[in-house]
Amino acid sequence: MKGEGVARTADPRRRAELLDSIVDYLADHGLSTLSMRPLAEHLGKSTRVLTHHFADKEELLSATMERLDARHRAWLRELPGWQGDDSVGTIVRRTWDWQLQEDNLPVARLIREIEGLAAGGRLAGHVPGLLADRSAFVAELLCERGVPSADALRISTLVNAAYAGLMNDFLTTGDRPRVEAALDELTALVDTWVSAHARG
């Protein structure tokens, strides 16, 4: 029979829709206990649907983190001031407030979980772009504000590390006033660094 034995090609649009549903599922249920059968049941699909789009759990996990990364960056770029003249410190604080909105907090927790699993070597050696490339992502914003690229990458690395630490602190302790006082100190430092390097 013509075409027999030829695997069907997964529809990219349906695959993207499926990945969005998986990201939402992981935001609500976490990543560490991910299993194909419960995931398929939650999505109202068979495991065959998942294996049609993803060869195995590792491919599904990799594709899901790439989708999360793309969605997260798109959300950040849509924040007021990202494309305008607002200071970097203002954008950092606006990002914080946005991530702590009730609807966005599950994704913030998921990102922190991914960080912990990656740091513990529990992602099969795969470092998601969400973590590996975020310094370059923020460095682009710094460059747009006049910071030379070499300085921008160094400052971005420091800011990302400090921001992630503060977010972990808040999600662990719930002490928002103390953590946000430190965040305000960080945003002020960021604007000082940007001003100094941009002048240079």
Image: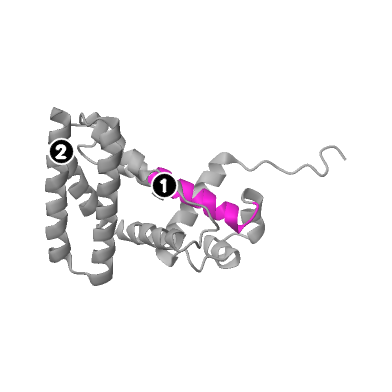
Labels 1 and 2: the sequence-earlier one? 2
Residue nearest the viewer, comparing 197 with 55: 197
Q: Residue flagged by tag 1: what amino acid is it?
A: Ala
In magenta segment, residue 116: no
Q: Secondary structure at mark 1?
A: helix
Q: Residue flagged by tag 2: what amino acid is it?
A: Ser
Q: Is residue 200 left or right of residue 33?
A: left
Q: Position of residue 133 (x, y in %)?
A: 40, 43
Q: Position of residue 31 (x, y in %)?
A: 47, 63
Q: Write the start and end of the magenta stretch as one range.
A: 55-71
- Residue 134 to residue 60: above or below: above
Q: Position of residue 56 (x, y in %)?
A: 63, 56
Q: Position of residue 77 (x, y in %)?
A: 30, 38
Crowding around mark 2 (Cα neighbors within 10 Å: few <14, some 14 to 19, many 20+) is some
According to the picture, the residue beneath numbered tag 1 turns out to be 132
Q: Is residue 186 visible?
A: yes
x 31%, y 56%: residue: 104
Toward which corner of the image does residue 200 lie, by quadrant? top left
Q: Is residue 180 left or right of residue 106?
A: left
Q: Is residue 93 left or right of residue 158?
A: left
Q: Secondary structure at mark 2?
A: loop
* Mark closer to the observer (1, 2): 1
The Cα–Cα distance between marks 1 and 2, rounded to whole angstroms, is: 24 Å
x 24%, y 35%: residue: 142
Crowding around mark 1 (Cα neighbors within 10 Å: few <14, some 14 to 19, many 20+) is few
In magenta segment, residue 62: yes
Residue nearest the viewer, comparing 25 with 141: 141
According to the picture, the residue beneath numbered tag 2 turns out to be 87
Q: Is residue 141 visible?
A: no
